[in-house]
């Protein structure tokens, strides 16, 4: 059994771990936990323990002791390393392998190399979309489509204030481009004050809708930037400050790749 420890403030950690399991262990039995398993019996039953994003846990809660012979791997993404580094304990957890889901900063990479037997890149692939957004379903007939070709998608599951900021950015961008697209917010809930004329669609995942979108407007979180990579020419990102996630560096990288 694979035990994945994925803790975070939103749903991004679950999306990333599901993609990891689909990419590296398709069909394997796995459990995803949002609290570090302190019961030795739980850890002893695991064939592999996967630590997502934060090598010492979100708050430095991961203990260095795991049962002998248990394989421990780390799924790493870009962090604001100067902010996160103080949480590393004196006896850090050691990894058999660290998977780099995206490039990290040099100091971050140096640390990972010091606590890992090997550090290798990993291109994540998402599992097939459920019927709600599977392309084979929503492209079959116009009356069944969730979005129409050319719609501008505003994709975000963050705080209402950030959603409204993305909506305002999309509207301003459309004016600057001389376009009048239909705006569709793809989010678990519509925030109070959503402007009239902006449609709301509560479906997950959003990525199957990207192919026919006129524009994709989002923050610069790990998952949406990865999933929108094939459509970088029409992806517009507004990075937001986070405790540890470096959305500004990720957005800058993606923009360089677009040019």
Image (spheres, helix red, strand yellow):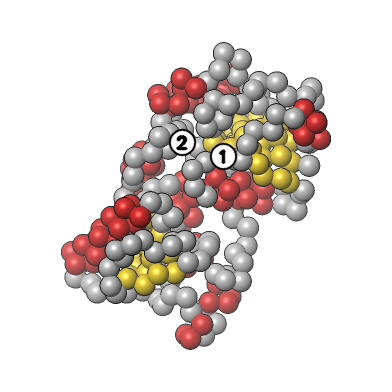
Marking on residue 7: 1
Q: Quadrant of residue 96 in the image?
A: top right
Q: Quadrant of residue 118 in the image?
A: top right
Label 1 sits on a secondary structure element that is loop
Q: Residues within 10 Å of mark 1 (few under 14, many from 20)?
A: many
Mark 2, residue position: 78
Q: Residues within 10 Å of mark 2 (few under 14, many from 20)?
A: many
Q: Earlier in the sequence, mark 2 or mark 1?
A: 1
Determine contact: label 2, label 1, CB under 8 Å.
no
Q: Using the image, determine if residue 197 lies above or below residue 255.
A: below
Front residue (pair 17, 26): 17
Q: Is residue 4 left or right of residue 109?
A: right
| Place of residue 145 in the rendered image (x, y in percent of width and height, measured from the top left) | 48, 79
Label 2 sits on a secondary structure element that is loop
| Place of residue 8 in the rendered image (x, y in percent of width and height, measured from the top left) | 52, 41
Q: Quadrant of the N terminus?
A: top right
Q: Quadrant of residue 184 in the image?
A: bottom left
Q: Using the image, determine if residue 22 lies above or below residue 80.
A: below
Q: Is residue 115 left or right of residue 181?
A: right
Q: Is residue 189 left or right of residue 132?
A: left
Look at 23% across and 72% down and name the residue there.
179
| Place of residue 74 in the rendered image (x, y in percent of width and height, measured from the top left) | 61, 33
Q: Residue furthest front?
A: 192
Q: Using the image, determine if residue 215 lies above or below residue 182.
A: above
Marking on residue 144: none
Front residue (pair 249, 221): 221
Look at 40% across and 24% down and name the residue there.
82
Residue 92 in view, yes or no = yes
Look at 53% across and 77% down and name the residue there.
138
Look at 36% across and 72% down and name the residue there.
199
């Amino acid at each position: 059994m694979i035990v994945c420890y994925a803790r975070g403030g939103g749903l991004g950690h679950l999306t990333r771990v599901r993609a990891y399991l689909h990419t590296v262990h398709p069909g394997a039995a796995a459990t995803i936990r949002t609290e570090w398993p302190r019961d030795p019996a739980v850890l002893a039953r695991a064939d592999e323990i996967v630590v997502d994003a934060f090598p010492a846990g979100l708050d430095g809660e991961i203990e260095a002791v795991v049962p002998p012979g248990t394989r421990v791997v780390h799924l790493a993404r870009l962090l604001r390393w100067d902010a996160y580094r103080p949480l590393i304990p004196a006896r850090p957890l050691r990894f058999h392998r660290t998977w780099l889901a995206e490039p990290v900063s040099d100091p971050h990479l140096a640390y990972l190399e010091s606590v890992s037997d090997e550090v290798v890149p990993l291109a994540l692939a998402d599992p097939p979309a459920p019927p709600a957004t599977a392309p084979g379903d929503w492209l079959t007939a116009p009356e069944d489509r969730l979005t129409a070709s050319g719609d501008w998608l505003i994709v975000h599951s963050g705080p209402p204030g950030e959603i409204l900021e993305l909506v305002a950015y999309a509207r301003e961008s459309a004016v600057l481009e001389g376009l009048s697209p239909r705006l569709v917010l793809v989010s678990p809930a519509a925030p109070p004050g959503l402007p009239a004329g902006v449609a709301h669609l509560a479906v997950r995942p959003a990525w199957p809708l990207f192919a026919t979108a006129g524009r994709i407007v989002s923050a610069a979180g790990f998952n949406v930037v990865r999933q929108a990579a094939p459509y970088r020419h029409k992806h517009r990102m507004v990075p937001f400050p986070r405790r540890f996630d470096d959305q500004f560096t990720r957005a800058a990288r993606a923009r360089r790749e677009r040019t």
